[in-house]
Amino acid sequence: MSDTFDVIVVGAGAIGENAAGRAVQGGLSVAMVEAQLIGGECSYWACMPSKALIRTPQAVHDARALPGVTASFDPAAVLARRNQFTHDWDDASQQEWAEGAGITVVRGTARLTGPKEVQLDDGRRLTATQAVVLATGSVPAEPPIDGLADTEHWGSREATSAQAVPESLVVLGSGVVGCELAQAYARLGSAVTMLVRGDRVLPKVEPAASDLVRAGLAADGVDLRFGVNLTRVHRDDDGLLLHLDDGSELRAEQLLVATGRRPATDDVGVETVGLTPGETLHVDDSGQVQGVDGDWLYACGDVTGRAPLTHQGKYDARVVGDVIAARAKGTVDAAPWSRYAATADHAAVPQVVFTDPEVAYVGRTAQETERAGIAHDVVEIDIAVGGSSLYADGYTGKAVMVVDRERQVLLGVTFAGPGVAEMLHAATIAIVGEVPLHRLWHAVPSYPTVSEVWLRLLEAYGL
């Protein structure tokens, strides 16, 4: 194996794969280094296995919302189906894809040792003629709770790869991971308690959406404890004992800590090029790492802190791969909205929370718009159209639209309700394209679909 390549990509998750693939398509030779499984977090411990845990209980719940339907599921079959999606944590098919795409796969842990050079844990050195891309993702950020580090517990990896459903589960954290997995395990049969530090679940979404998710969790039997903190935890002969700051105690078979993630830059050698281990790698819109001499170091995905979502990281990675290939042939004009600039990271990031009800949102929330000092209008309505009444008896949902008052374009859209995830891309296109509302009015939604809520939103705005 040659030790010199045009590009070295450190990290072979979905983001690294995309950066490597685009660079190869641009005519460059690429080595992609991975210490664990090719395909990374999303394929084996995050997006795919978590949604596999969620999907069957959700389908059964949807069926039960229709009159005359009786449905049930076997939790063991749900776990088995999840295992299929992860290929039982075997990445042979992912390696086959990478090699078929012309990427050289290198197994091992890589650290930067200087400009355009990395060293593997077995002593091998790889040199890049053009660029090094850091796509090492993120790791759980656990709070400094007394006894936590010494007590066996779940992070998101353990929760999504578990081979049995615990009788009882305490979830610490009320963000996306906490809410999705709390509801999933409640539906799989666990007695679930969620500890919420503040007064809202999903505090970053529109309040109307947060309220609906809170009600959905409660309806599934999740015991929501607001305004409490875990202060101490340990195991004894009866299992886990958790001490809360209100003086109460909880017993549980398992604890899931879902309190966020931080960039995985602790041990990749960034200090050799003047950066600080453990910190975010700040990049420009072309993906080039700032604060490093030359134009050879790039990063994409969670390590950049820009938009820690698989789909957005893959978007950034495609930009990085294209930029490196183009710069190898000459200069690049990374103008906004060109293929060489990740412009969407700033104001058009879509996300779905796969709870029941789902929350699908893109762009700015009303609160974020207010903080940005942009003159705006907010429309908030119930999702109550022909399509929603057909979808389920008693369908309950909300739609929120944030409008730039001066430019008359959308800044943000949120949908909350059953099955709204598939409606999100229309909103993303409208925001990325900056479609004027008077033109969006002519995008007629089909009847009877839930998308008719678009018409109601624009009517409520006065069109």
Image (spheres, grey):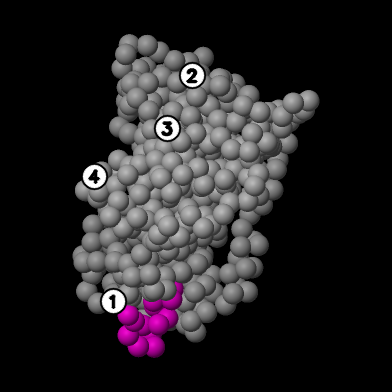
Residue type at mark 4 is Arg
Q: Secondary structure at mark 3?
A: helix
Local crowd size for mark 2, using a 10 Å CA cut-off: few (<14), some (14–19), many (≥20): some
Residue extending farthest to the front is 463
Question: Compared with residue 412, is residue 234 higher up or lower down, i.e. above or below?
Answer: above
Q: Position of residue 32 (x, y in %)?
A: 48, 69
- For this rendering, which residue is in front, 333 or 398? 398
Q: Earlier in the sequence, mark 3 or mark 2?
A: 3
Residue type at mark 2 is Asp
For the residues marked 2 and 4, what is the alpha-carbon distance in whole angstroms? 33 Å
Local crowd size for mark 3, using a 10 Å CA cut-off: few (<14), some (14–19), many (≥20): some
Question: Compared with residue 257, is residue 193 higher up or lower down, i.e. above or below?
Answer: above
Residue type at mark 1 is Asp
The image quadrant of residue 49 is top right
For the residues marked 2 and 1, what is the alpha-carbon distance in whole angstroms? 52 Å
Residue of label 4? 371
Residue of label 3? 208
For the residues marked 4 and 3, what is the alpha-carbon distance in whole angstroms? 19 Å
For the residues marked 3 and 2, what is the alpha-carbon distance in whole angstroms? 20 Å
For the residues marked 1 and 3, what is the alpha-carbon distance in whole angstroms? 45 Å
Q: Secondary structure at mark 2?
A: strand
For the residues marked 4 and 1, what is the alpha-carbon distance in whole angstroms? 34 Å
Residue 350 appearing in the image: yes
Residue of label 1? 295
Task: Name which residue lies at 49% across and 34% down.
Answer: 382
Q: Position of residue 224 (x, y in %)?
A: 45, 21
Q: The magenta stretch spans which residues?
A: 321-333
Q: Which mark is residue 223?
A: 2
